[in-house]
Image: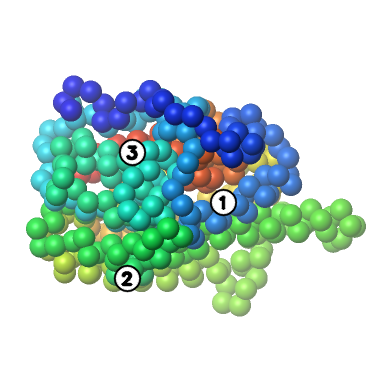
Amino acid sequence: MNTRPAVDPRPAVGSRPAADRRRPGGPSATRRPLTGALLAGLLLATGCTAGTGTAGTGTAAGTGTATSGAGSAAPSAATTPTAPAGPYVALGDSYTSGLKIEPQVGEPAGCARSAVNYPSLVARTLGLTGADFRDVSCSGARTADLTGPQHTSDGSNPAQLDALSAATRLVTVGIGGNDAGFMDVVGECARQSLAQSLAQGLGGTAASRAPCRDHYASAQGGDQVRSRVAAAGEKLAEVLREIGRRAPQARVFVVGYPALLPADPAACAPVLGASVAPADLGFLAEKEQELNTMLARRAEAAGARFVDTAGPSAGHDLCADAARWVEPPFPGPGLAPVHPNARGQQGMAAAVLKAVRG
């Protein structure tokens, strides 16, 4: 463990199921600015965190440009100055569980946990195995699923906080995006762009520069997304208090979400085409930043530490082609749209390890 990376960056051996061979995907598909198809892909992405998805059956982690070669992002035990003690418990949603990244492990299968998600990489690097490491993250999880059972399409996941005890010494929690309905916002932006395109084609009114932003801002009470993020923050605060009660000796790290979009929306034109208005891509990036800011503030208020993954993932967004950490609407074979790939999980693991060792 001390002389090699926590994960072998070479592609694992595996074959692609027939279903994956038939569907569009991979690098060539992501570069086609086909508005209708990409809109469908964005809408499809909104279903990936609903808590009903089954474990992925695609190629092994590291296959193709979407997941190969972690480079400097891969954590290495050789640089570990100290080894935090376990037991370590990982809590979270699909960005933590590693949705559809092979190999999928654990029960229930509907949680879609990967053996190479960031909790597993962190535990492996720190030498925490057996009873010293429990990953109870689950795709589709909301804060309520940390204190109550979560029902998936393939089994029920017990309340995640039940894995904690007075003996727990390290906790990571990646949650809040589903409470804020962030993937729903992504889907709504796709729908708004489609509706505007259809209206223009039928000779409708002049196009809005940012139809999705206008949609959310026009609601009674102002910015709906900001209100949802604030409400998610209240729920997270309750979860962090409960973590402190159940595991009073644990160091707690709230893990943020990686950057989905580049700072310049124009960089997404080769991948997304006109599927979302450029100004609305900026709107989505702004809202993800608000989500991460909320997580950071709630972590600080609870005496926990926030792990920034947006900064390290800059330049590795879903429009970054071969360098991406997050898959585009039409992902690589067997992977989940608008979710981290294996490289992304390695990058998130490196950020967590840096915080844990700090």
SS of the residue at dot 1? Answer: helix
Residue carrying label 2: 148
- Say if residue 60 shows up in the picture: yes
Relative to 46, residue 148 above or below: below
Number of other residues with Cα within 10 Å of mark 1, as a class: few under 14, some 14 to 19, many 20 or more: many
Quadrant in which the C terminus appears: top left
Q: Name the residue located 32 percent from the left edge and 53 percent from the top edge.
A: 107
Q: How is the image coloured?
A: rainbow
Disc number at residue 198? none
SS of the residue at dot 3? Answer: loop
| Farthest-out residue, bottom | 220
Pick whichever of labels 2 and 3 is earlier in the sequence: 3
| Labels 1, 2: front one | 2
Relative to 63, residue 87 above or below: below
Residue carrying label 3: 116
Disc number at residue 45? 1
Which amino acid type corresponds to the residue marked 3 in the rendered image? Val
- Say if residue 312 shows up in the picture: no
| Farthest-out residue, right | 203
Relative to 25, residue 213 above or below: below
Q: Is residue 87 left or right of residue 328?
A: left
